[in-house]
């Protein structure tokens, strides 16, 4: 099983992003997804910046994938997506518009978790259009994922990725909740989310941790952690284990994960702040 | 002439929609194949056959929503729903799942397929994807687009467009929100319901205050005289930093009555009323107002102004007795 690093969901200053990937060139990671998937207003990084980082990561032996917006509503967003698709690099499509574009270009693609693939006929349809890897929807239970792959012809040639560690992307809106928390309209957000490199925590009035506000995206409060379930994850047919970036991710995290995957280390036990309910088909926020 | 598409979650609601002047009524089957899967709601095959007869008599169209996402273990239930809807004489099927669209397009090439809002097509290229692959005739636009964005789409869309006119304000891109399953295990995509009723619990306190819970998570606290709303979790009051507020959205309903002239000029083909989970009284009241408003627009053209009595009537059935233009209005964003 390969280790992948999802695109950074948050809005970090340019220097932070550059440092982050410079560090990760040395990490035990096979595939790195790069770019902006949440909000088109975030302009710290240009496409050229991302391409420069991509080249550096490729020199370090990593497979690189450019990502694209999950919610494309404006003309500029559509244009940017087309530019991303035109770079000759692999692209993660997070919306059917991007699937359409990549299919028109005859380019193989990867479907992100916000493309709804819940059954084998849908998976096979996207494969016919050129999909070579897919990231399972976050709410798909382990048994459903295994059943889906068992029903898929040529399942062995399709790469399947699952969000193994990190906060779950739960929803996208037209509204920016970080701006709303500051009583600012979205049009005058002043990119306030750069002040929240870990997002904003949302708890119930009884202090149950619920969500993380990240601009127009709502993430889970807890990271999902499937490291203790690696044998089950593998036997379901998963080929890629996705880690979602957080500011404090250390190189040693990936070394330990690699050792877990190869069976060279003691299995990990899930911590009390993490969740794994979705894998078991129960509420995603719970821990089984 | 904009088509008025009304919801019916029951046979009485269906009759109410017909009597109130709907051009089209949309329904779903009594199972998880549609996004309003609540106990006691929706249509058996027999009821749908009766509805077909009544609709034909009144020259009203009948659409069937099969707009959730089948799983590997229950795929056949969804294809059966498509087969049944076609056999029972639906005028169009409202679908979201790519595999199911492929199934319907291949098996019933003459059937009109509409793209459900649950498929979340928010731009012209996404619409082209569904038009090229499955020859859809119409798409229902998500409630996350501004009026300007809807106008642009009307210009560039390869298919007819339907927009929401009134009802629940879904503030997330539909079909891509799993907040509900994060708390309960069930979501519109996988079970056909957001914040399912079986997970809802109300607690009355001695001082008259009330708490609403979803799978034991506190969604909101209401003062003794405060009107309470259904604990849809995106409309709960939560804590961010030291503030407790409606973190994502206040409990309001979407109402675009005042936008009728703009929507008509843009070329919007149909207006959808949301609410298959609502009562026949709601359906009758809302459809009656919208029938009157659309007819008034045809008669008055540019001079159209919504009648205050229509707005008052809609406010009585709106969530929290408030309405919003939602994302159609830029300041809301």
Image (spheres, rainbow, N blue to C red):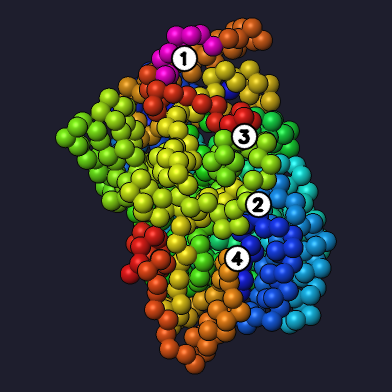
Q: Position of residue B19 (x, y in %)?
A: 38, 18
Residue A185 tag number: 3
Residue B311 tag number: 1
Report if the CB atoms under discs 1 and 4 are less than 8 Å apart: no
- At mark 3, the secondary structure is loop
Q: CA distance from mark 3 to mark 4?
A: 27 Å
Q: Residue at x 27, y 25 (%)?
A: B225
Q: CA distance from mark 1 to mark 3?
A: 26 Å
Q: CA distance from mark 1 to mark 4?
A: 49 Å
- At mark 4, the secondary structure is loop
Q: Residue placed farthest to the left in the image? A: B206
Numbered disc 4: what chain? Answer: A
- At mark 1, the secondary structure is helix
Q: Same chain for the residues at labels 3 and 2, yes or no?
A: yes
User: Relative to residue B236, is residue A152 depicted above or below?
Assistant: below
Of tags 1 and 4, the one toward the viewer is 4
> As drawn, is B106 to the left or to the right of A56?
left
Q: Position of residue A272 (x, y in %)?
A: 37, 69
Q: Residue at x 16, y 35 (%)?
A: B206
Q: Position of residue A190 (x, y in %)?
A: 69, 41
């Amino acid at each position: 099983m390969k280790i992948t690093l999802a695109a950074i969901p948050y809005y970090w200053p340019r220097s932070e992003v550059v440092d982050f990937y410079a560090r990760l060139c040395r990490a035990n990671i096979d595939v790195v997804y790069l770019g902006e998937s949440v909000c088109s207003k975030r302009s710290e990084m240009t496409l050229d910046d991302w391409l420069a980082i991509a080249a550096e990561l490729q020199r370090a032996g990593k497979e690189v994938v450019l990502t694209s917006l999950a919610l494309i509503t404006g003309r500029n967003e559509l244009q940017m997506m087309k530019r991303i698709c035109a770079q000759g690099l692999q692209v993660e499509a997070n919306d059917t518009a991007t699937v359409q574009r990549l299919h028109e270009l005859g380019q193989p693609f990867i479907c992100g978790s916000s493309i709804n693939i819940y059954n084998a006929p849908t998976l096979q349809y996207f494969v016919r259009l050129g999909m070579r890897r897919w990231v399972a929807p976050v709410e798909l239970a382990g048994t459903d994922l295994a059943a889906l792959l068992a029903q898929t012809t040529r399942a062995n040639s399709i790469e399947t990725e699952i969000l193994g560690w990190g906060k779950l992307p739960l929803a996208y809106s037209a509204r920016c909740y970080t701006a709303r928390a500051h009583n600012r309209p979205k049009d005058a957000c002043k990119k306030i989310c750069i002040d929240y490199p870990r997002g904003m925590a949302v708890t119930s009035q009884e202090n149950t941790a619920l969500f993380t506000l990240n601009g127009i995206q709502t993430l889970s409060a807890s990271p999902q952690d499937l490291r203790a379930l690696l044998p089950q994850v593998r036997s379901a047919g998963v080929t890629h284990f996705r880690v979602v970036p957080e500011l404090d991710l250390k190189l040693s995290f990936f070394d330990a994960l690699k050792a877990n995957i190869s069976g060279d280390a003691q299995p990990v036990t899930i911590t009390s702040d993490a969740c794994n309910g979705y894998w078991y088909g129960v509420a995603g926020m719970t821990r089984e | 002439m904009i088509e008025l598409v009304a919801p019916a979650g029951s046979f009485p609601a269906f009759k109410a929609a017909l009597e109130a002047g709907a051009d089209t009524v949309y329904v779903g089957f009594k199972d998880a194949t549609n996004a309003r899967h609540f106990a006691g709601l929706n249509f058996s095959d027999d009821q749908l056959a009766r509805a077909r007869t009544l609709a034909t008599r009144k020259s009203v169209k009948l659409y069937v929503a099969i707009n959730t996402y089948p799983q590997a273990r229950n795929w056949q239930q969804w294809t059966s729903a498509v087969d049944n809807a076609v056999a029972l004489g639906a005028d169009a099927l409202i679908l979201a799942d790519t595999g199911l669209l492929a199934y319907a397009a291949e098996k019933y090439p003459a059937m009109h397929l509409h793209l459900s809002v649950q498929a979340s097509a928010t731009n012209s290229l996404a619409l082209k994807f569904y038009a090229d692959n499955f020859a859809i005739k119409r798409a229902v636009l998500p409630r996350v687009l501004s009026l300007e964005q809807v106008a642009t789409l009307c210009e560039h869309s390869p298919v007819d467009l339907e927009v929401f006119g009134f009802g629940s304000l879904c503030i997330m891109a539909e079909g891509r929100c799993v907040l509900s399953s994060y708390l309960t295990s069930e979501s519109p995509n996988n079970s056909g319901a957001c914040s399912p009723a079986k997970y809802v619990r109300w607690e009355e306190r001695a001082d008259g205050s009330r708490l609403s819970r979803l799978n034991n998570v506190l969604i909101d606290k209401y003062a003794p005289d405060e009107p309470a709303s259904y604990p849809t979790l995106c409309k709960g009051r939560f804590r961010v930093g030291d503030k407790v507020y409606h973190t994502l959205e206040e409990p309001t309903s979407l109402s675009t009555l005042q936008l009728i002239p703009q929507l008509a000029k843009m070329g919007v083909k149909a207006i959808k009323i949301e609410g298959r989970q609502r009562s026949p009284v709601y359906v009758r009241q809302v459809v009656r107002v919208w029938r009157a408003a659309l007819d008034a627009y045809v008669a008055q053209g540019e001079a159209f102004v919504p009648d205050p009595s229509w707005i008052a009537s809609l406010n009585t059935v709106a969530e929290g007795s408030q309405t919003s233009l939602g994302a159609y209005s830029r300041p809301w964003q």
